[in-house]
Amino acid sequence: MAHMNDQFTQELLDSLGEDVGSKLASQNLLSKEQTKEALGSLSPVILSSLKRKQEELDEGSFEALLESASASESHLENLDDTLSLETPNPEIGGVLDAQAQDQTVMALSKKLGVGSGIAKKVLPMLIPIILGQLMKKGKQSGGGQSRSSGIGGILDRNGDGTMIDDIAGMILGGGSSSKQGFIRMILSMIFGRK
């Protein structure tokens, strides 16, 4: 599901998987198991994307990206609002651009066996949860440093794949390496990188 050494994802599932799953199940969006599967699959994609952006941007620009994506622990403190269909969702374009969002929706749909409409609804609900957990862990490990410094160690430790590989893995659900190579090639062409 996630990288074997991804401690962040495991902690995310342990601390929030049950609560988030219950709330999405009550809205008839995903079952608890599907929610955990979605969080476990999405987390490496988000971490890989953020690690790439952190490497490309200076600290101020990366801080601005986190701000624009509404990355905050507050998303964990009031799950009802974060997971509500009525609440305007934070801007997630800074974390996943439009192409990456489309590919992730397709991958989630296939991974969970749900329609793309459901996947499109839950994606902007789950990303703030992942970002909130990242901010919480970053604050704990960063002490008095800036947010980007605090989460840097987590991204270095856990964002060890590439977003393309992580999305390809979601689509295949553990398929053969030759198929994964083919999917990766297609995604690389779409994203314009190797």
Image (tube, grey):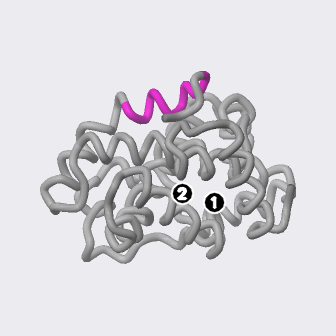
Quarter occupied by residue 68: bottom right
Q: For this rendering, which residue is in front, 151 or 188?
A: 188
Q: Would you say the magenta stretch is mainly helix, strand or loop?
A: helix
* Left or right: residue 116 compared with residue 132: left
Q: What residue sits right under mark 2 in the picture?
A: 71
Q: What residue sits right under mark 1 in the picture?
A: 66
* Left or right: residue 167 compared with residue 25: right
Task: Give, as a single range, the part of the protein colored magenta.
Answer: 5-13
* Location of residue 106 with respect to 171 vertically, above or below: below
Q: For this rendering, which residue is in front, 156 or 164?
A: 164
- Amino acid carrying label 1: it is Leu
Query: Marks 2 and 1: in contact by CB < 8 Å?
Result: yes
Residue drawn at x 16%, y 61% as measured from the top left: 28
Locate residue 104, reporting x and y percent.
54, 61
**Which numbered tag is attached to residue 153?**
none
Q: Is residue 129 magenta?
A: no
Residue drawn at x 53%, y 48% as measured from the top left: 170
Disc 1 residue crowd, few under 14, some 14–19, many 20+, Cα 10 Å:
many
* Left or right: residue 15 compared with residue 84: right
* Location of residue 130 with respect to 104 vertically, above or below: above
Residue drawn at x 39%, y 54% as measured from the top left: 75
* Left or right: residue 62 compared with residue 166: right
